[in-house]
Amino acid sequence: MLFDKLKKLIGRRYFPLNRLEISQKKLIKNYKHLSAIDKKIKVAPVLKSNAYGHGIAEVAKVLDRLNPPFFCVDSLYEAYKLYKAGIKSRILIMGYVNPENLKVKNLPFSYVVYEIGQLNQILNYQPDAKIHIFVDTGMHREGILLKDLEEFLNDIPKRYFGNIEGLSSHFGASEKPNAYETKDQAKKFKKAVSILNKYGIFPRWKHFANSDGLINSKVLGLGSISNMARVGLGLYDSVLRFITHINQIKELKKGDKVGYDFTYTAKKDMTMAVLPVGYNDGVDRILSNRGEVLIKRVRCPIIGRVSMNITTVDVSKVKNVKVGDEVEIIFNPKINGRIPYEYMVHLNYEIKRVVVY
């Protein structure tokens, strides 16, 4: 990463203006809480999209000591990052893998499949690989339709049956456990389990639920048809802090305008601070004139357009504010109906991630 290269270039004492703090204590607490919801269901952390922006290696190193059944990633690239970071837990690749990338050497990964050609190519190049069959139970993205599952199994060479260690699917609206669609998905997954069993396939892992699915597992009866959940959102709740610092303070007069297109006009004399962070770093432009930051426990509104590397804020209410003061970026889920994780996955990879207690 850029930060590591800079540190080598200018020495150990390099202090970045922007950093992301990942709370080890909260991350472990969240994992243990989710693991206690249903003792029949193991929790597999989802680390795709750079662990929802938190830092894939940083999060994995914290959770690896808790012996999760898998770390779930989207790509072979992400799996390699964990492998190179020395992660001991097993890695399940949920997304499509270009078979050409599997020719080089034997890899210790498991793969989700939903197309017979995909399965044959993976096992042709990685004969010891473990496979998780993905069925489409109604969300209608990737996956084998239930009506096509037997045909799919008939096309699998019998010698590969022993490689099948998992059956998986995904809820479309698990936060609504009593909805017809959600209950129908659970019924279809149960049917998929019985179809595999009919073929003499008894997968070690059956996973269907995300965070909300796990929370609602009792209502959905998931403990009787699955033994693993892939959790992301619930795992990262309140784990991350985005920190920057003030690099300039100036006094504005009533009527002064701020930023591109002059979208903000000072309604009275005020104090403004300039922050060295912008939409390149993950502070979305939608926060322009709408978002907030936290300085000395005081909420300060973002004023004017968020620029590529600069954000300006009203600090009139902050006592003794000065250049160098720490600033925390706040991601408000009420703005434009976005969830916090929509912001977090856009956090720049090059921002320094720091695991704190």
Image: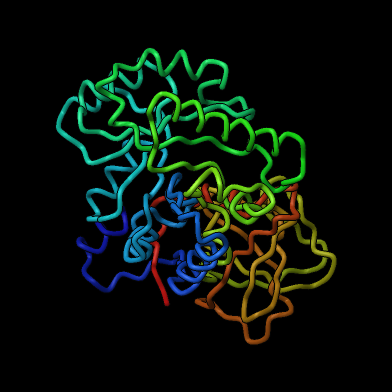
Give coordinates of residue 52: x percent, y percent.
49, 51
Q: In the rendered view, how is the structure colored? A: rainbow
The quarter of the picture where residue 272 lies is bottom right
Residue that lies at the very extreme toward the right in this rendered image: 267
Residue 312 seen in render: yes
In this rendered view, identify the residue nearer to me: 290 or 252. Answer: 290
Whether residue 41 sits left or right of residue 252 in the image: it is left
The quarter of the picture where residue 357 lies is bottom left
In this rendered view, identify the residue nearer to me: 243 or 6. Answer: 243
Residue sitting at x 77%, y 55%: 264
Residue that lies at the very extreme toward the bottom in this rendered image: 320
Whether residue 234 sits left or right of residue 255 in the image: it is left
Residue sitting at x 68%, y 41%: 173
Whether residue 29 sits left or right of residue 262 in the image: it is left
Give coordinates of residue 283: x percent, y percent.
58, 53
Residue 241 seen in render: no
Residue sitting at x 47%, y 30%: 134
Q: How many marks?
A: 0
Residue that lies at the very extreme toward the left in this rendered image: 105
Whether residue 240 sits left or right of residue 132 in the image: it is right
Give coordinates of residue 10: x percent, y percent.
22, 65
Residue sitting at x 35%, y 37%: 165
In this rendered view, identify the residue nearer to me: 261 or 110. Answer: 110
Give coordinates of residue 232: x percent, y percent.
52, 52
In this rendered view, identify the residue nearer to me: 130 or 192. Answer: 192
